[in-house]
Amino acid sequence: MTQLEALLDRAADSGPIRFDTADVRRRVVRRRRWRRSAAAAAAVLVLVAAVAASARRPDQVGQTRGAGEPSGVAALLGRWTAVSITGGTASQQLDTRLEVLDAEIARQQDEVSRSQEGSPERQAAVDGLTDLYARRADLQTTPHADEYIEFRADGTLGGNDGCTGFGGHWRLEGAQLVVGALASDGIDCAPAFERTLRRVLETKPTVTPASRAGTIVLMSPAGTVVLGGRDNQIESELMADELDGVVKVTFHTPRSLASGSQRTLATWTAATSVEPAISAWVQIAIDGLPDDCRLESIPRWEELSADIATGSWDTTPRWDHRRGESTGDRAIRRDVPASCAGSYTMVLLLSTDFVAAHIVTERVPITIG
Amino acid sequence: VNDAEASEFCDRIRDRLVGSLTLTCGDRGVAEELAQDTLVRVWERWSHVRRTDSPEGWTFRTAFNLAGSWGRRRSAERRANRRSTSAVAQPPADLTDVEAVRRAVSGLPERQRAVIVARFYLGHDVASAAALLGCAPGTVKAATHQAIANLRASGLVTDIPEEADAP
């Protein structure tokens, strides 16, 4: 044995291996089970989102009478470039479409079993089944539009009900939010969110500052709707290879940040539709940082984007779903020197799986002062 | 039958797989995670893998690909850290320190790393290493030569058989 072989033997051996074939088998079984219930997993995700939304609203509404908070709604709105409301029915629409397809698949499977082996009818039925499976896979893996409405500081608004986009104008009359006629892009696809939103907005809801900084509340006879806040809130969702699962990450980033020690550049909450059989990584990069600004472990976007463009995407595993908890809050805190002052774009990245990974990127403004 | 065969194959290959990935990544925890990922893929595709010329080769190529992707992920962090901290002189390699050996091997370029592991840890000759890694024997020879030159430069190895180092 050569010196090199002896060295490698010693370096490769670190005592007992902490997994065995039974662990591998369990993971295989779990992934098979997941594939069989991918639609159910999507429904779980909707449930998670719905529970999270319903859990958030009463809390924030309860704080609307808090003391020492911003008093002028107009002044409060003046600090924003835009605020958004996100809806919750796009995934439900997806789920409904999946159910319809599943019923068609079941009928087609019957068709295949009834037809005679080797007959043209059998071939046609199999082709039909293949097409249905392909449509189902497309439906599951094609990102559906998030439902949202965004109120912009220039008085315009825009949104998507999960299928069709719409836009219009808004203004404040005192504390009342007045929204003009909404124009949609005309796609006919049951715009439930838009209809709901119209009903809420037509009541001219009252805008109230909440005690939570940067949050306002729309009070209406139909209920209470929470408008985002001064911070950016970005929701990203992706599906891993081979239907491993869906990961949804919500980023919160400040729009402005004072320099100093251990400033919070971003926090996030993550949820997955399956038990940690899936890994997800989140990372932030900043576009346009001056050379003399050093933020530990935060890459410049120009470096990272070049790697992504060439396919050798380099994201840092800031949070590994598989190794960490299945859900939880995380934060990136860094010392921010005064030399970093300026306005930049922060790029938030979400990725999953080691091979053929998908990357979702979102861009938000940030000012360091 | 497929599950039983896959299970037996995974059992047989597990230790060498973890060892190879430990050298490739320089981190035992990551190596175990990547090895599990690899074996799950092998198991799920066993009906295909078992019909390939070399199920073992398929497995190690998958593992080295996974390790390569993991390494690329890490590089951004390393670059950012280098930018934010001043350069620190590396201490000379210590032959008794397994961490130093892992660092030296895992610091090699991807192809060289795979070749070193295939030849000097898994014990393949040039031809079978080429089959294992899915490349030409000439590529294996060249990568071996370059890898050994790099390891010599790091002071880690001094005693390499002449034929192993032949370009």
Image: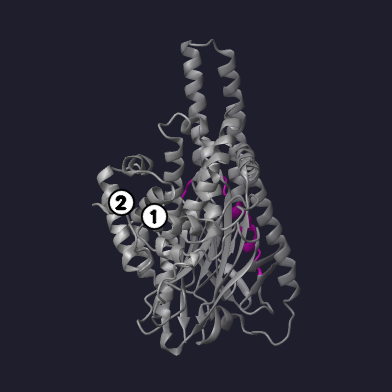
Q: Is residue A196 left or right of residue A300?
A: right
Mark 2–mark 1 Cα distance, whole angstroms, equals 10 Å
Magenta residues span A184-205
Name the chain under label 2.
B
Say whether residue A356 is visible. Answer: no
Give the answer, above or below, for where A250 lies relative to B9. below
Q: Which residue is mark 1?
A: A2
> Which residue does the image show at 49% across and 27% down from the upper left?
A130
For the N terminus of chain B, which image quadrant? Answer: top right
Q: Is residue A37 left or right of residue A354?
A: right
Which of these two is toward me, B35 or A45?
B35
- Indicate how the structure is coloured in the image: one colour
* Secondary structure at numbered mark 2: helix
> Which residue does the image show at 50% across and 87% down from the upper left?
A259
| Residue A339 sits in quarter | bottom left
Q: Which residue is mark 2?
A: B164
Residue A198 drawn in magenta = yes
* Secondary structure at numbered mark 1: loop
Percent position of residue A133, x then y? 52, 32
Which of these two is toward me, A294 or B112?
B112
Which of these two is toward me, A71 or A332?
A332
Say whether residue A108 is visible. Answer: yes
Give the answer, above or below, for where A89 lies relative to A65. above
> Which residue does the image show at 49% across and 34% down from the upper left?
A134
Which of these two is toward me, B10 or B79?
B10
CB atoms of marks 2 and 1 within 8 Å: yes
Circle 1: residue type: Thr
Q: Is residue A182 left or right of residue B58?
A: right
Residue B135 drawn in magenta = no
